[in-house]
């Protein structure tokens, strides 16, 4: 079935000299009939005729045919087996080159790989970060990003008092690495697009319906915590982890906003009217107290004048001092008599008052 040791040695020697023809052993050469005599060289005229393309191609084809006949004539019995072995070796080398280029794959940081086998389906083992082996054509790795990804979801829902509320929720989600084969089998690679919008809208509508519009504003922290708790419970059913859930925007309809503004304006007007009433009451009290004070002051002044006439003289001296102080600070020149300046402290009326006092 295989060539002899001598035949293989001759084949290697021929290949080393750049030949592709195996050299048969001597015994085979002795039993081989001599080759036919070579034809005589063509005449110059015939050579000129062979220069045409058609004749040139025909001559080359004849030479190839003769070389093939000599190769098959010199091959020993069973020589087709080595040729098949060489073909299998070439196929093996080609497969090895293809496999070496496609049998490795890398899993980057923050990622995991799920292996899909053509005959076994999705494998339960999850590949971590690093370089891993894969069988080309038989296995196919599917990469997943297990880092937290933010997502904004808006929902229009109704409150307990039938007010339309527009809520924007920010969700920070990531898949559970231990359940990646199940996620790939049931949800695929776009799991967040399939799961998050539906469960977020469902949870928002169920929670917001339990609060009034005013409670959504005043109890925002409690509402956010309730939404987070319910959303975590729903996400675990799909093997998703939520790192953060927060309300980023909360707005109401135009009608409710206008009603709230009108209510606030009415409350401000009521507070303003109350302030005006309180101000009038305070001013009334102030006027009464001021009148009472002035009456009491007049009574005291009258009693002082009646009991001591020198009180009027004291007040005149104080007034004269104030007038003199004001004129001293002025840069203008003023010519007034003592009567106008209240400086005539020795007026005739004072003398009459003193004499009247002495008579008493």
Image (cartoon, helix red, strand yellow):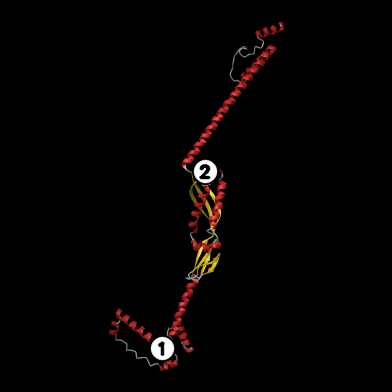
Distance, label 2 to label 1, CA atoms, is 101 Å
Mark yes or no: residue 313 visible.
no
**Left or right of 317: which side holds 40?**
left
Residue situated furthest top in the rendering = 359
- Between 328 and 319, the residue placed more toward the observer is 319
Q: Name the residue under label 1.
A: 74
Q: In this view, does 209 lie above or below 72?
A: above
Where is residue 41 drawn, in percent x and y? 32, 87
Q: In this view, does 140 lie above or below 247?
A: below
Where is residue 298 drawn, in percent x and y? 64, 16
Q: Which mark, residue 187? A: none
Is label 1 in a helix, a strand or a loop? helix
Q: Which residue is drawn at 30% across and 83% down?
A: 47
Is label 2 in a helix, a strand or a loop? helix
- Between 276 and 324, the residue placed more toward the observer is 276
Where is residue 61 drawn, in percent x and y? 34, 82
Q: Name the residue under label 2.
A: 213
Q: In this view, does 329 lie above or below 359?
A: below
Quarter of the picture containing the C terminus is: top right
Q: Which of marks 2 and 1 is nearer the N terminus?
A: 1
Nearer the observer: mark 2 or 1; the answer is 2
Q: Residue at x 60, y 24 (%)?
A: 285
> Label 2 crowding class (10 Å Cα cut-off): few <14, some 14-19, many 20+?
many
- Between 355 and 43, the residue placed more toward the observer is 355
Where is residue 352 drawn, in percent x and y? 67, 7
Mark yes or no: residue 95 visible.
yes
Q: Which residue is drawn at 42% across and 92% down?
A: 29
């Amino acid at each position: 079935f295989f060539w002899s040791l001598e035949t293989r040695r001759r084949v290697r020697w021929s290949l080393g000299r750049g030949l592709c023809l195996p050299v048969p052993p001597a015994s085979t050469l002795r039993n081989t009939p001599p080759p036919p005599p070579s034809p005589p060289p063509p005449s110059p005229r015939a050579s000129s005729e062979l220069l045409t393309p058609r004749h040139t191609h025909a001559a080359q084809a004849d030479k190839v045919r003769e070389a093939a006949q000599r190769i098959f004539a010199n091959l020993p019995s069973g020589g087709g087996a080595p040729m098949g072995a060489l073909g299998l070796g070439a196929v093996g080398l080609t497969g090895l080159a293809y496999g070496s280029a496609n049998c490795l794959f890398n899993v980057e940081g923050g990622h995991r790989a799920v292996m899909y086998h053509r005959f076994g389906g999705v494998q339960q083992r999850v590949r971590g970060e690093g370089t891993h082996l894969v069988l080309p054509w038989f296995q196919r790795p599917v990469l997943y990003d297990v880092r937290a990804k933010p997502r904004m979801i808006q929902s229009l829902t109704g409150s307990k008092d039938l007010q339309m509320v527009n809520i924007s929720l920010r969700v920070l989600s990531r898949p559970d690495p231990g359940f990646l084969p199940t996620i790939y089998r049931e949800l695929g690679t776009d799991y967040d697009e399939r799961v998050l919008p539906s469960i977020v809208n469902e949870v928002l509508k169920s929670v917001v319906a339990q609060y009034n519009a005013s409670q959504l504003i005043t109890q925002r922290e409690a509402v956010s915590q309730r939404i987070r708790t319910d959303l975590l419970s729903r996400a675990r059913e799909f093997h998703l982890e939520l790192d953060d859930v927060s309300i980023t925007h909360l707005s109401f309809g135009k009608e409710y906003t206008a009603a709230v503004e009108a209510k606030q304006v009415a409350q401000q007007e009521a507070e303003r009217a109350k302030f005006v009433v309180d101000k009038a009451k305070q001013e009334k009290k102030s006027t009464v107290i001021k009148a009472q004070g002035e009456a009491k002051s007049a009574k005291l002044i009258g009693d002082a004048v009646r009991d001591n006439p020198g009180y009027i003289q004291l007040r005149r001296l104080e007034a004269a001092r104030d007038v003199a102080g004001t004129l001293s600070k002025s840069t203008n020149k003023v010519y007034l008599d003592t009567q106008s300046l209240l400086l005539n402290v020795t007026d005739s009326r004072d003398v009459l008052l003193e004499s009247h006092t002495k008579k008493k």
